[in-house]
Image (cartoon, rainbow, N blue to C red):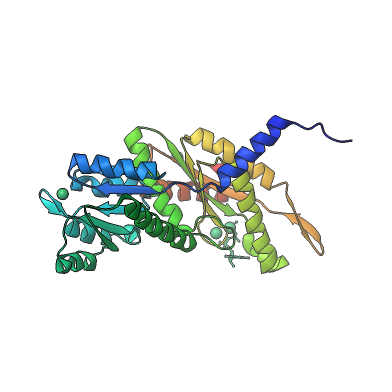
Amino acid sequence: LVKPFDMHELIDQLDQLSAEHEQEPFHIIIVEDSATQATYFSTLLSKAGMVPTVVSDPMDLLDVLAENAADLVLMDMYMPGCNGMELARVIRQFPRFASIPIVYLSAETEIDRQLDAMSLGGDDFLTKPINPAHLIRSVAIRAERARNLRTFMLTDNLTGLLNHTRIKEQLHSEVARAARHGTTLAFAMLDIDHFKSVNDTYGHHVGDRVIKTLARVLKQRLRKTDYIGRYGGEEFAVILVDADEREARSILDEIRVSFSKIRQFTSGGGFVATFSGGVASFPGAKDAVSLALEADKALYVAKKAGRNRICA
Ligand code: GH3
Ligand code: MG
Ligand code: MG
Ligand code: MG
Ligand code: MG
C-alpha cells in the first residue's frame, strides 16, 4: 500500500531540513562612538546577511558580550574617555572572550600605533575609509574561522552535544538574557543510574552506547532553542529556555519514561537503563552558579529517593 503523497508534509520536511543546515548568521558587535559611522557599518553588514549590534558607549561592551554569542568585534580606536586598545586588553582578560576575533576599524594609519593595538589583543587592523566589499569579506573570513574553531573546541565528540565548558558558558548568557527580559529558564542536571555497573557488566562500549542513546533522546525531545550538554562521563546538563520549574520537570519526566523503555541489546540479551534528574529555575535561583548548585542538590535528592526520577 502506497501512502498518498502529501505535498504539504514534504514542504514541511524540506523546510525543517534547510532550517537545520542553514548557517546561523554572523553576530557582529560594532564598537563605534560616531552614530553616523555606526549606522553606515551596521547597514553594510546587515545587507551582507550578518546581524550587527552597535555599542556606542564602550562601557556597555562587556554586558553586551556576556549576553550575545558574538562572532566578532569590530572596534573603533578613538572614543571619548576610552580607546579601543584598552578595551581589547580588558576583553582578553576574560577566558570566555579570549577567542572572539577583534578587528580594529580606524582612521589610524600610523603603522606603529596599529601594531601596538594588535599586540593588545587585536586580530586585524582595517583602515577607514574602507571599501565595503573588503570590510565584509574580512569580517566574514575571520568570523567563519573563529566559529569553526570554537565549534570544534566546544563540542563533545562522543555525543556531538555541547561540552562542559560550552554549556556553562551558555548558562551564564541565558541567565543574563532572562534577567534582562524578565523571562524564566530552567536548568537540569541528569545522571545515568548505576552506570558503573553497566560498564562493569557489559563493557565500556555498551556504556558508551547508553550515553549516546540518552543524547539522542534528549536531542529528539527537547526544543531547538534548548541547550543540551554532556557535563561529564554519564552526566548531562540541559538549559530549558522560557520554561519554569514545573514545565521543565514534566518535559524531563516524559523523557525519563521514554528512555527507561529503550532496550539496550547485548550478546546475552539486553537491559534497560534509567537516569535521575535535578531541576532548578531562574528566577528562584539568583544566578548561574546557584542554578547549577540547586540542580545538583535536587539530583542528589533524586538519587537518594531511589533513582529513575526527576526532583526539583
Ligand atoms: P549513580 O546511580 O549513583 O549515579 O551510580 P553510578 O554508578 O552511575 O555513579 P558513578 O558516578 O559512581 O559512576 C559513573 C561511572 O561512569 C564511572 C566511570 O567509570 C564511568 N564513565 C565515565 N565516563 C565514561 C564514558 O565516557 N564512557 C563510559 N562507558 N563510562 C564512563
Ligand atoms: Mg571614534
Ligand atoms: Mg555520575
Ligand atoms: Mg550515575
Ligand atoms: Mg527547587
At which x and y percent is residue 169? 40, 53
Residue 306 in sight: no
At which x and y percent is residue 243? 48, 35
Task: Out of 94 and 41, give the one closest to the viewer.
Answer: 41
Relative side of 68 to 110, left or right = right
Quadrant location of the N terminus in the rendered image? top right
Residue at x 53% of width, y 61% of height: 156
In this rendering, the answer to whether 266 lies above or below 291 is: below
Q: How many tags in the picture?
A: 0
Q: Quadrant of ligand 1?
A: bottom right
Farthest residue in the left direction? 81
Residue at x 33% of width, y 59% of height: 101
Task: Out of 178 and 271, give the one closest to the viewer.
Answer: 178
At which x and y percent is residue 63? 27, 46
Residue at x 25% of width, y 64% of height: 121
At which x and y percent is residue 76? 20, 52
Residue at x 21% of width, y 53% of height: 128
Location of residue 221 (image quadrant): top right
In this rendering, the answer to whether 184 lies above or below 83 is: above
Task: Out of 67 and 45, give the one closest to the viewer.
Answer: 45
Location of residue 257 (image quadrant): top right
